[in-house]
Amino acid sequence: MSVRITLTDSHMPPSEQFLEFIDSWLTGAEFDGSTWATYRQERPERLGHRLSASASYQLRQRIADSQAGMRHLGRAYELFVALLIGDVDTIRAVQQRFRFVLVVGAPRSGGKYLTKELFRALGYDPSRVPAVLAHDGFPEAAPWRFDQAGNTWVESLHTMAEYLTMVELFFAAADRHEDHIVVPKKATKAAYAPGLFQSVLGAGGEGIITIRHPVLACISTYETAGGLPPDHRFVQRGNIERLWARDLLSAGFSDGEVAGMDYFDAYLRCWEDYHMRLAMGGSNFTRRYRVVAYGAERLMHEARRNADRYGSLAADVEEFHAYDRRDRHPEWVARAETALRRVGDQWARVGMAFPLDELAECW
């Protein structure tokens, strides 16, 4: 018996991020990575950021009118099908060329700095590496969702295929290290799909886990989002807060309960759940990843280590700016203790070293 299944790009359309990358690649325009890589010039994406219908149509049309554009689009769908059906050889061919170094950690824990310094160590100007390749918004991975837009699992496979296609283009001429082209990637979302990230990007690779005390990470988050709400209630203003809300809803809270939560309580629950996910994410996280606790000296030491490894000058490592906020919200520090110990116990259970003493420095 043979059943033929026909799906088109109308059922599974390419992502806007991928189309924008391909459009820039075709024009030969220099990529702007300042939105993620340039200190104090970062521009976090706000809620509702989407291309207009007209701009989206024009973008698609430019790619459709280009033979090379359609070839790149076809390659993404080829890799997507390989992931869907288990075409191991097609994915292995990518892995034989590239070795990915993933930097995994919750937002505001130093991962962007280490990712940027990895690119610098490999000879790239981070401000010319597009965010879609370097930063943590892409590929997509999230708690389960099923609605008219599709479902999370298919979306993760599709965007992973698009990411691999972009890697093949952007890094094609890069120098090899130990017989592979090394590709750094800030991969916050790997915690939500550890099997996918490890089997596709982590095979034979290594990585870094960054971690920061939840009180200081929360302060850093609300400072970038416009400040602590006057009533200390949780509010969604940007991508990070939107991800908290998504995770809280996935954990069983209602919209009303999320809207009524204390700001730090909302963050602390998400912080704990995220780090529990890391502990349950599989042997690659527990055996092959180095844990770096937040702090200027520790992060710069890791950056220099990578610079030495990849043949660049450790003296060229950018200074990491850490600000002393240890006198802020002492009541939050006490409330965080139980969550810290629960996460530490779970990490110990799976053989991961939890840096409780370093986190207690409250950087």
Image (cartoon, rainbow, N blue to C red):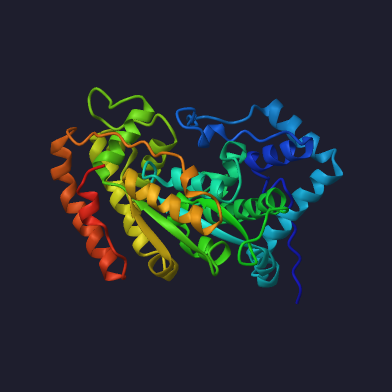
Q: Horizontal and vertical percent for residue 39?
A: 46, 32
At 85% from the left edge and 38% from the top edge, which residue is drawn?
65
Residue 144 can be seen in this image: no
201 lies left or right of 288: right
Q: Is residue 157 left or right of residue 112?
A: right
The quarter of the picture where residue 218 lies is: top left
Q: Position of residue 146 (x, y in %)?
A: 51, 51
98 and 123: which one is in front? Answer: 123
Q: Is residue 99 left or right of residue 280?
A: right
Q: Position of residue 109 (x, y in %)?
A: 36, 45
Residue nearer the viewer, 100 or 163? 100
Q: Can I make out residue 174 in this image?
A: yes
* Rendered view: 211 above or below 266: below
Looking at this view, name the residue that lies furthest to the top.
230
Quadrant including the N terminus: bottom right
**Up-down: is 146 above or below 38?**
below
Q: Nearer the viewer, residue 148 or 241?
A: 241
Residue in the picture at 63% in, 51% down = 163
Please tell me which residue lies in front, 116 or 145. Answer: 116
How far across and down, in percent of the image, does residue 235 sit? Answer: 33, 30
Residue farthest along the bottom direction in this orientation: 1
Q: Quadrant of the C terminus?
A: top left
At horizontal 35% and vertical 54% (from top left) the residue drawn is 292
Count of picture labels: 0
